[in-house]
Amino acid sequence: MQIDVAPAGEISGALIQASSSTRADGAFAIADLQLPTGRVVRKKADGGFRFDSLPAGTYVLRVQALAHNIRVDTLRLGDSVGLRLTLPVTPMANDACGFSTVKLSNEHRDGSPIF
């Protein structure tokens, strides 16, 4: 992960291939930021994400590029500077036909149902 300075109150970034510095294949990115008041989801076709007007605090960022594994990071945002991130993501494994395999579940990790 590369971290650069961004304007105060901002968490933004781009998803790149873990094996290089190029944008993740498929480029489409989903970013989910856990806030004290709930979650905010952003979807962007260029492989980036951006959250503005955030108060200082600790955030959990969950990102995924199309056909790539999910990445989860805990971030600390200060009062005077924001975070501009470059996050490497790894491609999902392909099956014998060349399709990415996706495991779907109707349960949380602790076994409780998702509704």
Image: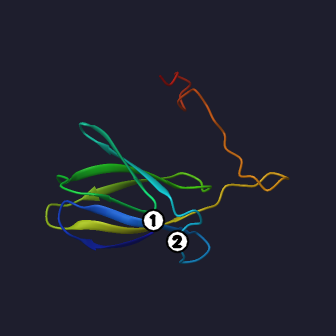
| Image quarter hosting the N terminus | bottom left
Relative to residue 38, is residue 68 drawn left or right? right
Question: In which quarter of the view is residue 84 placed?
Answer: bottom left
Label 2 SS: loop
Q: Residues within 10 Å of mark 1 (few under 14, many from 20)?
A: some
The nearer-to-camera label among 1 and 2 is 1
Residue 74 percent across, percent down from the top left: 38, 53
54 vs 6: above or below: above
Q: Nearer the viewer, residue 41 or 2?
A: 41
The residue depicted at 17 percent of the width and 65 percent of the height is 8
* In the rendered image, the vertical position of residue 3 relative to residue 79, given as above or below: below
Residue 40, horizontal then vertical, whole percent: 32, 44
Percent across and percent down for residue 23 are 52, 71
Q: Which residue is mark 2?
A: 23
Q: Secondary structure at mark 1?
A: loop
> Which amino acid does the dot numbered 2 rest on?
Arg
Q: Position of residue 114 (x, y in %)?
A: 50, 25
Is 7 above or below relative to 35? below
Looking at this rendering, what residue extends furthest in the bottom direction?
21
Q: Are marks 1 and 2 in contact (CB under 8 Å)?
A: yes
Characterize the local packing of mark 2: few (<14), some (14-19) or many (20 or more) Cα atoms within 10 angstroms: many
Is 33 positioned to the left or the right of 110 in the image?
Answer: left
Q: At 47% across and 64% down in the image, what residue appears?
A: 47
Residue matched to label 1: 46
